[in-house]
Amino acid sequence: MEKAGLQPDEAILLSKPSNIFYVSGYTGEGIALLAGDLCAIVTDFRYTEQVTRQAPGFEVFEIKTGQSHFALAAEVLAAHGVKAVRFEADEVTVARFDKMKQDMPGFTLTALKGEPEQVRRIKEPEEIACIRKACDISCKALANLLPRLKPGVSETDIRLDLEFEMLRLGGESLAFNTIVASGPNGSLPHAIPGSRKVELGDMITLDFGAKFGGYCADMTRTVAVGEPGAEMKKIYGIVLKAQQTAQDALHAGVPANSIDKIARDIIAGEGYGKYFGHGLGHSVGIDIHEDPRLSPTCQDILTVGTTMTVEPGIYVPGLGGVRIENTCVIGETASETLVTAPKELLIL
Ligand SMILES: [Mn+2]
């Protein structure tokens, strides 16, 4: 990918798992080296065969007992005439940077400026296909769960049920820890599922996603078990309008914060502005949270092929909360949602 911009004596050293997967398809531990005539993974005995299976285009170098990945990388790079190494400053800890300096003497070490992530912003059709499949699995898991959402079921039981369904339906893992927030717990945007049992009249916020082909789904639905109170119903209507209006406005060529503003203005206009304290959305791919963001401060111009969640919410302490979230792909004049589950208020 970004090898095109490299000098002949320069290499990129990747240690962030999502960037290594992006360039190579390899999902195990280790580091990736990219230079003019070199694509390599440096790893240990446990993963050597896995590299050859997942990343056939990459040479594999296995560290000796006691040898650090950086020390072996230094040998490999020196043999290719490399003198300068660029690394991921947002991934390498201070301790690992010290180790890198110690084990790679003589190399000029400079930080990448988020170039791998920049390239990853625009998803290839094969990447979109994986995210779509992850979203399909997630939607089916929700549909299978719904008949079992009843008074007396605990949040942790709901979480287990939903996660089991996602894995049973072909999800290879979970994109993130499932959020289940029932009744008054709904006012916590990132509630941890607990022992609280669902009561009649509760709204339940479910924020979850499967992973497929290395790519994440991200979706949220808030459903009611029995007739909810009047204010929660009103809040649901506001969030739904904010979600739909912002999603309808999402397309290439506009600044990210203009989409955030659409949802924020609708919610504020109804008097709930102070109860929507997070950004409207984020990009999603190999990592669950990627740039750009739909937030009041992100001025990036949206581009075709970028994925984006649209997830407004209203959280009222003591009452509850509502969030509705779709993962969308940005097109030239419109966006397409990859999450097809209905958004209208569902009263079970
Ligand atoms: Mn999200």
Image (tube, helix red, strand yellow):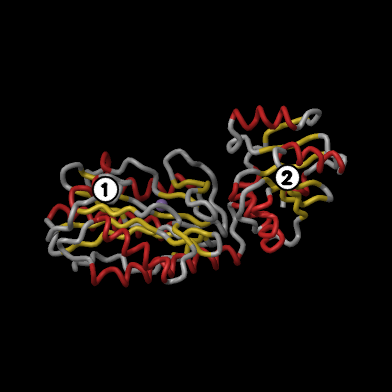
Label 1 CA crowd tier, 10 Å (few <14, some 14–19, many 20+): many
Label 2 CA crowd tier, 10 Å (few <14, some 14–19, many 20+): some
Residue pictured at 75% horizontal, 36% vertical: 71
Residue pictured at 61% horizontal, 35% vertical: 92
Secondary structure under badge 2? loop
- How far apart are the alpha carbons under marks 2 and 1? 51 Å
**Badge 2 residue CB within 8 Å of ligand 1:** no
How far from the left and from the top, in percent, is residue 182?
22, 54
Residue pictured at 27% horizontal, 55% vertical: 156
- Residue holding disc 1: 314
Q: Earlier in the sequence, mark 2 or mark 1?
A: 2
**Of 122 and 186, the residue lying toward us:** 186
**260, above or below 245, in the image:** above
How far from the left and from the top, in percent, is residue 76?
81, 43
- Residue holding disc 2: 63
Q: Quadrant of residue 271?
A: top left
